Image: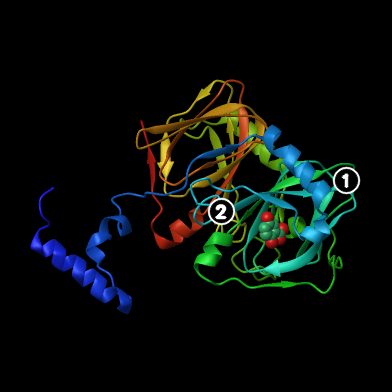
Amino acid sequence: MNAPHPAALEREQLNRDMAPLNLSPLWEVLHALVPREPATPCLPAHWKYGEVRPFLMRAAEAITAEEAVRRVLILKNPGLGGQAAITQSLFAGLQLIMPGEVAPSHRHTQSALRFIVEGTGAHTAVDGERTSMKPGDFIITPSWTFHDHGSQAQGPVIWLDGLDIPMIRFFDAGFSENDVNKSQAVTRAEGSSMARYGHNMAPVQHDAPFGKTSPIFSYPYDRTREALERLERDAPIDEWDGVKLRYVNPLTGGAPMPTMATFMQKLPAGFEGKGSRQTDGAVYSVVEGEGVALIERNGQSWRFEFGPRDHFVIPSWHTARFSSKRGCVLFSFSDRPVHQALGIHKEERLS
Ligand code: GTQ
């Protein structure tokens, strides 16, 4: 080792002397603060349903939905040091409700999405309107609307919760409150929001009842699947995505929530996708079928062989390619609307 250059000693002394004044040199951290390209600490991760489900059932023995308020197992990104986050900006968890249980009504500024994974016969109530849940349905809880969940099902009902919790935490802009009632009084018939906004039409006299969030609470799977199936038969298959649609807010054409975009894609049997990467890390829920996600980043690679009801996360700027021998259907969500609002969304498709 050479003796430190005098300037180095001077710099160390400078750092020590100014630290008590809450000052530190940018030049030592500039590359980390302004990286050449996204350098997320998030890691790709895969939760196999067969491994997760027994813990959900144990949770049902350990705590009631009412006591838990939300009986959720958090899907934690292993690269984020124990934070309740699946990416830097997003929360994901699997929520379980048993027959007869109620998850009491509350509201918060965090937006939430539900993607139904298993079981039929539970409902969520949003702003006085109940929506029943079936596997593959995508359901929205807009920011600051009261919501409670209940179940008259025969067995367990499990769904994926996606929330913008870490993003709202980042902005320190979160509020929440409990409702006076455990379950909301029903003030509108089930299907009202779909009738008003879900048929490529809208009421002549209306405003945006939930601000920037879609007024449709439930996007049922049968309609989504029908569209994908028809497109698989009749339209060109995208070499990267297969057949992939994004859910829209019918009043704006934009994403259903201001902070989260949602997608459903069908990979035809025999699909061997090309690789792509994007700045928005995404969470996937496997609806039907099996396949493989090959993920690469800086010479490291991950291979996820996924099946129905599995979940996995592809972090920002990780290259992913999908393949499926017998075909599959994948739901996903990300913070893309925020990237787009900021003008920083970037996607790269490899040839
Ligand atoms: O259903 O309101 O997974 O407030 C985390 C926080 C679900 C909910 C979660 C929540 C909820």
**Front-most of residues 58 and 122:** 58
How are the residues colored?
A: rainbow
Mark 2 belongs to which amino acid? Answer: Ala
Q: Is residue 6 left or right of residue 50?
A: left
Across and down, in percent, residue 80 comes to 50, 51
Q: CA distance from mark 1 to mark 2?
A: 30 Å
**Front-most of residues 303 and 26:** 26
- Answer yes or no: do the residues labelled 1 and 2 have beta carbons within 8 Å? no
**Which residue does the numbered mark 1 point to in the structure image?**
153
Residue occupying the point 62% across, 21% down: 326
Q: Is residue 293 left or right of residue 189?
A: left
Across and down, in percent, residue 334 comes to 53, 50
Callout 2: few (<14), some (14-19), or many (20+) C-alpha neighbours within 10 Å?
many
**Front-most of residues 47 and 210:** 47
Across and down, in percent, residue 270 comes to 55, 20
Q: Is residue 83 left or right of residue 222?
A: left
Quarter containing ligand 1? bottom right
Mark 1 belongs to which amino acid? Answer: Ala
Q: Can you tell which of label 1 and label 2 is closer to the viewer?
A: 2
Q: Quadrant of residue 317?
A: top left
Residue occupying the point 12% across, 57% down: 4
**Which residue does the numbered mark 2 point to in the structure image?**
85
Does mark 1 have its CB less than 8 Å from ligand 1? no
